[in-house]
Amino acid sequence: MSTPQPHSHSHDHDHGGGEDLELLRRGNTAAAWDAIYSPDERRWSGQPNQALVAEVAGLEPGTALDVGCGEGADTVWLAQQGWQVTGLDISGVALEHARAAAEAAGVQAEWIHSGLDDVELPEDGFDLVSVFYPALPSQPEGVSLIALLGAVAPGGTLLFVGHADIDPEEARARGFDPEDYLSIDDLEAALQRSSRWEIAVRERRPRHVEGGAGGGHTHDEILKAVRSAD
C-alpha cells in the first residue's frame, strides 16, 4: 500500500481544511489525491511556500528532494535557485501540472510518481530534503521517518513544515486522527536522540496568506535540522 504523500503545493495550501481532512478519512490514496485536482487548471497559486524561501535562500545549492511536491511550486523555485531537484508525489494529476510549471519556467527537474515507501531513494542522496504539510502514517517501524532521514546527505539539511494550531478533537470529529500521522514532534524527538543531527530551527511562525484555499491557515510549525558532515 502506498504511503500517502504530503503536498507542498504553494503558500496558500491548507492541509488542515475540511476537504483535505475528508481525503484523509477516505484513505488518502493516489486516487483520492488525484480527485482534488483538475487536469485543466491548477488548484494552487504556483508560489513557493514562504518558509521554504526563508530557510533555503541562504543555502548553497546542491541536490534537493521535494517530498510531496504537488503541482511543483516549491520544486520549480528550488530549480530556479540552482538546485538539482527531484519532485516526489503520489498524484499523477498533480505531477502533470508540475511538469508544465517547470517547462513554463524554463527549468529542469526530475519527477517521481510514487509514495514515499514505494520508491528506492538513494541513501545519503540529497543535500536538502524538503517536506511541507505531510500526511505520512506514523508506522510502528518508522518507515517514513527512516526514509526521510536516510535520504539526507552528510552535511545536508532537512526542512519539515506542518500546520500549527490543529485542533485534535475537531480533526477526530471529521474522521482524521492526527496521532495516526508522523508529526513534527515525532521528528524532533527522533533527531534529538541522534548525535548525527543538530536542530537549527524549531519554531511556530506566522504565515501570511491573502484569501484562497489557505486563507484560514495563519501559522506554521517549522523544524530545520542539519546532519553532521561525518
Image (cartoon, helix red, strand yellow):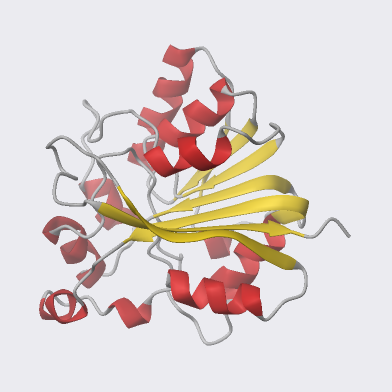
> Residue at 53% of width from left, 72% of height from top?
187
Identify which residue, 1 or 58, lies in the foreground.
Answer: 58
Foreground residue among 182 and 111: 182
Q: Nearer the viewer, residue 23 or 46?
A: 46
Is residue 39 in view from this perspective? Answer: yes
Query: How many numbered circles does the render carry?
Result: 0
Residue 56 position, x and y percent, is: 56, 38
> Where does residue 66 sit, x and y in percent of width and height?
53, 44
Q: In this image, 173 relative to 47: left or right? A: left
From the top left corner, tell me how far across and down residue 161 is, in percent: 43, 56
203 relative to 216 in the view: left or right: right
Quarter of the image where one finds residue 137: bottom left
Decide if residue 72 is in sight here. Answer: no
Q: Residue shown at 61%/55% (left/top)?
A: 158
Q: Is residue 161 above or below residue 191?
A: above
From the viewer's perspective, is residue 138 above or below residue 112?
below
Residue at the (70%, 63%) spot, across then down? 150
**Residue pictured at 72% horizontal, 34% vertical:** 62
> x, y percentage for residue 107?
55, 18
Point out the image quarter for the N terminus: bottom left
In what quadrant of the picture does the C terminus appear? bottom right
Question: In screen coordinates, is 35 left or right of 57?
Answer: left
Q: Residue furthest right?
A: 230
* 51 left or right of 230 in image: left
